[in-house]
Each structure stands twice: as C-alpha cells, then as structure tokens.
Image (tube, rainbow, N blue to C red):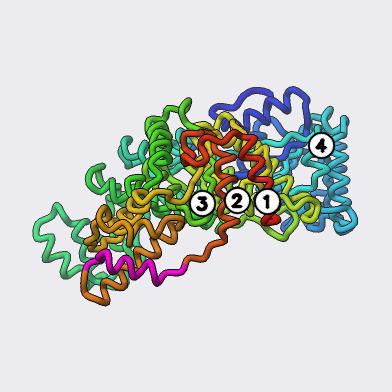
Amino acid sequence: MSAPLARVPAWAEKIRRAYLSGETSLFVLHMNVFDRVLSGGELHDLPRYLGRVLFGANKRNILVYTPSTGVEIVRASAEIRDIEELCTKKSATQLIPLLEAILMSTDSTALIIPYADMLVPPGEANLLGEQDRASVIALHRWSLSKELADKDNIVVLLSEALSGLHPKLVTNPRVTTIELPLPDETERAELIRHCDASLPEPLVTRLAAYGAGLKGVQIASLITPRIPSDLDEEQRREFILDLLHDEPHADERADKLATITRGMSPAEIRTLLRPELPAADPQPDAGDEDGALLALFAQRKREIIERECAGLIEFIDPKHDLSAVGGLDGVKEELAQVADAFRKQDRVRCPMGMLFVGPMGCGKTFVASAFVKQTGLPAVRLKNFRSKWVGSTESNLETVLHMVRALGPIVLIIDEGDRALADEGESDGGTGSRVIARLKEFMSDPENRGLVMIILMTNRPDKLDIDIKRAGRLDKKIPFFYAEHPKDVEAVLTAVFRRHGVNVDVNYETERATTSERLLGYSNADIEAVALLAHELALRAGTPVTSSVLGAAIVDYVPSRDLDMLEFMELLAAFEASRRSLLPERLRGLSSEELNQRLKLKRAAIRA
C-alpha cells in the first residue's frame, strides 16, 4: 500500500491514505461487504480482493480468518511457524492468541476477518460469553498497540452493520470505520461491459442508470447471458431455427432436428450444429427489444431490493397524479411547484423533506402518492424496521438509508411518523434515541438535497422530536383540513366518482342542500366512503348516481368521529404549517400565541 494501485475504488483509497498517515492499523469495513469487486478483468469477493489485489503486492503475510471455518493462508513467509496448527484450529479461543502472536512477531502482515460481528458481537459485558469477551478485549488491545503499527501490520474487520459490532471497537478513535457504498453509475457500466461485451454502448448506459441500488453481484446475475436449460418442442425448434437462419431449407431442417435433439441441452445442440459459435448467444442489437429488456431489468431490480431489505421498505406504484385529488387547491399548487423542481433537478428549489400533517382521513397518504406520480421519481414506503433483538433496529435503519441514498433521486415516505419514530426513553435501552439521532443526521445531510426527499406523515406532530421538524430537515410543513365549503366537498366527490368510473347525474348547484352541504365536516375518507355507497345503491337500482341516491347514501352512512380530537388535530396542523396561506380562513388570522393557547385548552380538555 506504499503507492496507489491503478483504478482502485474510492473506499480502498481511503484505507491507503489512513494507513500511510499512521492514523490506525485496524479498520472496520461495513455495509456492502458481501459484494464483488471488479479488478483486472475478474470479479473478486471482498476478502479475496483485499488479500490478493489490495495487499497482494506489498504484504509478506496475508491471513483470512473466518469464525466458522478458521484461517486461510493466502500468503506466508518463513516468519510464520506452526502453520499446520494454525490451519487445523477453528475456535476463536484457540486462534485469537495464535493470530495475536503472529501480528506481534512478524512484519508486513495483513489479517482480514469477515463476519466480524460473529466474533465481537454487541451487548453488555455481563451478557456476553467468555469467548466473546476475550475476543473484544484482544481486538481492542490490537487497535491500541504501537508495536503492531510499527511492524507495518494491518487488521481489517468486515461487518455488514456497525451496530453488529461491539461498541468498544466502533467508538474507539484508533479504529477507522469505512463505509463500502453500492457501485456508482461508472462502476455499474464497467461491470455490465465485463458481464456482456456484446451489449451496445447506449444500452449499457441505460442499464447502468437503471441499476442504481443494486450490488455488483446482483447486476452480474441479471446481465450475464444465459441459455435456458429446459426447452419444450416448440422452444427447441425456435432455438434450432435461429441457429440455421442463414442456411437453405432451414424450416424443414428445424422440424426434423427438433425431434432428433430431444433431451439435449441447448449447449449440446449449439455444439452439434454450429460449433464455430461462441459459448453464449450474442445479444441482439439495441432496438425495439431494449424497452422490454429494461422493463425486465427494472422489475428484477425491484424484487431484489425488496428481498434485500427483508420487508423494511416497499415500492410505491401510484396510478394518479395531483389532478386526481379533489379540493385542496392550495396544497396541490404548492406540491406541483415542488414536483416541478424535482423533474428539472433544480436542487436549490428541492426541499430536504416535507411534513404532511392533519386529522385522520384528510387525504395525506393519497396526496403523497399523487405527488410521487407528479414527480416521476421512484418512491418507497418505510415499513416497520424495529426489532426486539439488540442492535437490529439500528442495523435495519442503516440498511434502509444506505439503500435509499443509492437509489436517489427518490422519495421516502414515512407514514404514521409519530409511531415509527417514537422515542420510548430508556425503556427500550436507548434504541429510540439512537434511531432518531441517526435519522436526524441523514435528514440534514446537504448532499441529499434533490436526491432523497422524505415525506413524513402524522396527525400528532406534537409527539415528534421537535428537532426533526425544523427547517433543513422538513423544510415544508403542509397542513391538511377537512372540506369547509360545499364546493370543496363537490370537488372531492367529483374526483372520487371520476377515479372509479362511476356514472353520475347530480346537479350540485341546485341540489346542494341535500348533497354536498350535508357532508361538511366529513373527512375525505368519509366522503369517498359515501360516494362508493351511493355507487352501490345506484347499481342495485340500475340507475346512475342521482341526487336522491347520493342523499340516501349520506343518510345511511354513519361516520365515526371524535369531534374534540379532530379539532385538536386541526389546531396542531395549523400550528405546524410553514405557510399561513395554506390555512383555512377561520384559522389564518390567528397568531402563533393564539393558536398555542387554544391548543393548551383543547389538550387539557381531551387530556392528550
């Protein structure tokens, strides 16, 4: 590591600089540690890349210690004795002292430890086993050892999540932690060319863009050409016809050969008929098939990411844009401007995040989905990432944030934010505090502006950490309220009927008293439920939805509402709003002090 290697990843250059500066001899590589690295025309797993490529030219001794299988000798000089004993032992209790003896008695040695979280797991000292405690002490001692550093030795721990390692190591200033990111667009393009050199360059560029969020090994599995192993009669005939397409009587020959070659693999058929062809079919020229290939690639990518995140996120496929939202004109105008900024990638105009706040059933979730459609960006919804296991919650959140950053530009939606981000104090061992602190750090990272936008939705913003709601994290706070005028109700009804393709024959202006006026104070969800009930009644009667049918549905429908709580939530929404112009007229003229006073009185009344 005395000189830069050609074309090393940025994270490898960080190791080199920190090592040469004498900052540390013990490194922790985390996040994308199970990927493969392209170097010298080959794909290497991380331990192999570190041992054979990064350290291979200048370390006399290179050892890889995997807790489950023991020690692999990549390279060993005469300084290392008792190699046979080293290779036959697997227990950490036996191997850690042997490895320490090697590190302290040899020069120019590299020790790589995959699955380090299995060797030095987190937890209170009294809850760890004797072997775990001994391993933690040993590695902590190595990090502080001047003798180890003076001998030009290096130790590299690999762990997918920092939270999976004992804090005595992670928080140690003599240990350097380096995050391994997912491949960037340039690295993805290089990998795609390596996997299939026949792909035209325009298609490589598009696939590289589509591959954001995928590991290198996943991209390789999607791109590497494959021949189906099991062909039925028709597929075999088509395969043979493709091989014989430039020969006379190809159709007749394909019919006969399809029967003769029954039971043979495609590779065997290829060798029999066209031995001069390469082992894999060349990809077709870029053309009409590119769209299908890209669509299949995107679909497989989505499946891989959802599986990789183990149900922590789900992709959103919105069907409607903001034009399908009834009423809420001020909100739609505000969000349309934001969507325009994201479409044009005007990062200065893009907010870091938005808070959607208002009573339940006022359309926050639907509007968020419509906003995503308006931007044209991919979007994911954060699901339950909390776990009962020590360190798992923090690890889950880190996985989500790492993936989201790699997928950007993207929208991350967090519904029921007051519950998802609840801080339970010390009752959860401080997990809530650590989660909120990490999320705050991510939300305020200026590098995320225009690339990752968080939409946090809640009807109880008073339960959120106050620092999360500040500008620079949630720049825009969008309040939602129930319809206050008959025309607002009619806009919601019209949008619902249009969205569901309902046949309607209602003149709202002349029949307002029996229709929309009676729905004032109803939530958008209640109004939609009434509209769908009217549709059901109309189908039974074999007529369109008329004013009498709609009136009957209104009479029949019973909304479930706690008026005091709804008023409290509306006051909270008004208090949190970042723009006074988005408030209804009855609240727009109130000062912050007046709103706060009314909130205190209402909170006391409902004991919230």
Specify the segment rendered in magenta: 544-558
Q: Are marks 2 and 1 in contact (CB under 8 Å)?
A: yes
Question: x%, y% of residue 4?
Answer: 62, 24
Residue under label 2, please give it: 568
Residue under label 3, please give it: 381
Residue under label 4, please give it: 172
The amino acid type, in three-letter code, at marker 2 is Phe
The amino acid type, in three-letter code, at marker 4 is Asn
* Left or right, residue 240 beside residue 388: left
For the question of whether residue 453 can be seen, the reply is yes
* Residue found at x 26% / y 61%: 501
Tell which circle, 2 or 1, labels the residue nearer the N-terminal end. Answer: 2
Q: Which of marks 2 and 3 is in front?
A: 2
Residue under label 1, please give it: 603
Tell which circle, 2 or 3, labels the residue nearer the N-terminal end. Answer: 3
Residue 349 lies in the magenta-colored region: no
In which quadrant of the rendered view does residue 474 lie?
A: top right
Q: Residue 113 shows which numbered tag? A: none
Tell which circle, 2 or 4, labels the residue nearer the N-terminal end. Answer: 4
Mark 3 lies on a secondary structure that is strand
Mark 1 lies on a secondary structure that is helix
For the question of whether residue 280 can be seen, the reply is no
Give how far apart the Cα atoms at labels 3 and 1 are. Answer: 31 Å
Q: Do the residues labelled 2 and 3 touch (CB within 8 Å)?
A: no
The amino acid type, in three-letter code, at marker 3 is Arg
